[in-house]
Image (cartoon, rainbow, N blue to C red):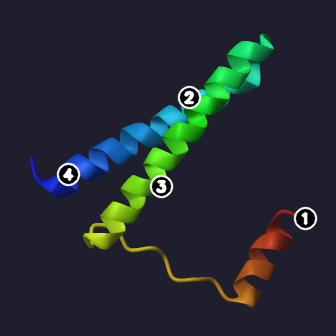
Amino acid sequence: MQDKEMLNDVLSQTNSSLTDYAGIIAQASNPQLRQVIQQIRNSCETFQHNLYKLAEQKGYYHAAQLADQSEIAQVRNLFN
C-alpha cells in the first residue's frame, strides 16, 4: 500500500470516529462519561488535523480555493 493510500485511509477512519464520538457525546447522560468522551474526541481532532497537515505537506491533499464574499453571501442566504 502506498503512503498516500495509507494516510487517506487513516484520515477517513479518524473522520468516522469523530462522527461517532459526536453521537455518543450528544446521548451521554453521565457527566463523567461525557467529559471523558469529549477529551478523547479532542485528542482525535488534534490527531486528524496533524494528519491533514501531513497530507497537505506531501501534496496528497489540496484545499479548495477560498470563497469570495459574494459566494459566502449566497450560501448564507440559502440558510436564512
CA distance for labels 1 and 4: 39 Å
Q: Amino acid at mark 3?
A: His
The residue depicted at 38 percent of the width and 37 percent of the height is 13
CA distance for labels 3 and 2: 17 Å
Q: Compare marks 1 and 2 and give the one earlier in the sequence.
A: 2
| Crowd rating for badge 4 (residues with CA inside 10 Å; few <14, some 14–19, many 20+) | few
Question: Residue 47: horizontal and vertical position, in percent?
Answer: 44, 46
Q: Secondary structure at mark 1?
A: loop
CA distance for labels 2 and 4: 23 Å
Residue 14 falls left or right of residue 1: right
Q: Compare marks 2 and 4 and give the one earlier in the sequence.
A: 4
Residue bearing the label numbered 2: 20
Q: Nearer the viewer, mark 3 or mark 2?
A: 3
Q: Amino acid at mark 4?
A: Glu
Instruction: Say which mark, if any, is on residue 5.
Output: 4
The residue depicted at 50 percent of the width and 39 percent of the height is 44
Q: Compare marks 1 and 4 and give the one earlier in the sequence.
A: 4
CA distance for labels 1 and 2: 28 Å
Residue 40's place in the image compared with 1, above or below, is above
Q: Compare marks 3 and 2 and give the one earlier in the sequence.
A: 2
| Outermost residue toward the left in this view | 1
| Crowd rating for badge 1 (residues with CA inside 10 Å; few <14, some 14–19, many 20+) | few
Q: Nearer the viewer, mark 1 or mark 3?
A: 3
Instruction: Say which mark, if any, is on residue 49.
Output: 3
Residue bearing the label numbered 1: 80
